[in-house]
Image (spheres, grey):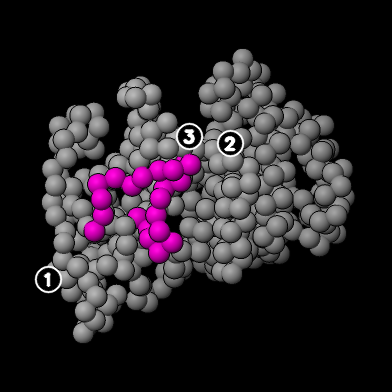
Amino acid sequence: MRMLGPLYSVYNRRLQEKLAKGELPRHVGVILDGNRRFAQGRHYEDVSQGHREGAQKIDELLEWCAELQIPIVTLWLFSTDNFQRDSLEVSALLSIIEAKIVQLTYAPTTYERRYQIRVLGRHDALPVSFRSAIQEVEERTRHHDGAIVNLAIGYGGREEIIDAVGQLVRSRSDSGEALDSIMSAITPADVDQHLYTANLPDPDLIIRTSGEVRLSGFLLWQSAHSEFYFCDANWPDFRKVDFLRALRSYQQRQRRFGGDGQREADVEIVRTYERPEERGTNLSHARLHTTRLTVQSTTAPEFLDITERVEDIVERTGVRTGEVRLYARHTSAGLTINELEPLLMGDMTRFVNRLAPPGDEYGHNDFSIRTVNMMEDESPDGHSHCQRIVFNTSEFVPLLDGRMQLGVWQRVFLVELDRAREREVLVQVFGE
């Protein structure tokens, strides 16, 4: 559902306060994707309206970054591939981006926060007025000492690497160094110094909106050790809570930068399909929303906390009262409400010992396997039924005022019993 204003604000504030206690990324990159799909979804006659609303969203993102004191933000506004679009759309989009640069050039917040604005990419194909706007914003903010705002325009990751290597070779060749000597001595650090982002730290976190799960060439060199977060919301629909959840996901990961240290068991949400499918089933004036949630663990046995992902699905359905139905696809996985009630099973010994030391009498052994009849198009595996293991929980989670009714000590977990693998959970939200 869409939270009411006060409740939504409280949730955001608590999440932001929690994030402030952990390590936040120094450099966040964002691929601003989905403006055209947003416009088509709103049935706008002109897709440029989607680009306009996307340009306005940039101000909100910069505000969120300022609140969290994130010092570097890189936004991909226009790629080299975008020149291949219809000429009228390209012209309109470039006009919108140029107007945005002019607005940022004179915006009071640019000077209050002392943003240093840089424009990255190849600019030869841009209109003369556009190039003038770039020159002006960079000159006016060059000596600012606040957050660095990189705008990637006419940008392509391959082109950036080609440009960097070309500049490196030319600079050394001009100094009289032989080509063989240049090529044998090039190091990654040398290339770094000739990238568009020279002298900046690589991005810690890269976010892409619109549900596409790829970088499309964004910061190819710099993203070697970046964390990625893919959000289904189109860019103009990207909310502060989406941004905060991306940061929370970042904080939950253990970054090893290629090291071989032992990694503790953790949880990675591989992909969340957050576009509930309304099947049009009206039962007592209620509607059934079905969403598939994909999660993956790194070890097994393990509890995978899916509470917030399920809550976000509930929020997007708009259901205020009803129930949430959770179905695990495989019999080697199940659902539980409380990870503090470990199962005393032979193949769970290692996990149980970690949660409840030997000699601890607290624990239950009341799991059961139930067969739940489902319509064929409701089943994740396409069958007319699926088996589901239920651990210490009722079949459904009740909803009231749009929130799952869980105790303060409770969470919703997917239980992985045998080995680490990708799992699919069917989340059904039923109600009004």
Residue under label 1: 346
The amino acid pointed to by label 3 is Gly
User: Could you tell me residue 276's position as x and y percent?
Assistant: 40, 33
Disc nearer the start of the sequence (1/2): 2
Q: Is residue 419 magenta?
A: no
Of the two numbered discs 2 and 3 in the rendering, the one whose residue sits closer to the viewer: 3
Of helix, strand and loop, which mostly describes the magenta segment? loop
The Cα–Cα distance between marks 2 and 3, rounded to whole angstroms, is 16 Å
Q: Secondary structure at mark 1?
A: helix
User: How many residues crowd mark 2 within 10 Å: few (<14), some (14–19), many (20+)?
Assistant: some
Question: What residue is drawn where x is 72% and y is 43%?
Answer: 59
Of the two numbered discs 1 and 2 in the rendering, the one whose residue sits closer to the viewer: 1
Q: Is residue 396 magenta?
A: yes
User: Could you tell me residue 274's position as x and y percent?
Assistant: 43, 39
373 up-or-down from 296: above or below = above
Residue under label 2: 237
Left or right of 363: which side holds 205? right
Disc nearer the start of the sequence (1/3): 3
Q: Secondary structure at mark 3?
A: loop
Q: Secondary structure at mark 2?
A: helix
Spot the residue most to the bottom.
Answer: 359
From which residue to which does the magenta span run? Answer: 392-412
Q: Which mark is residue 37?
A: none
Question: What residue is drawn where x is 16% and y is 66%?
Answer: 365
Please identify the quarter of the rendering in which residue 49 is found. top right
The amino acid pointed to by label 2 is Asp
The C terminus, quarter of image: top left
Residue under label 3: 318
Question: What residue is drawn where x is 46% and y is 46%?
Answer: 403
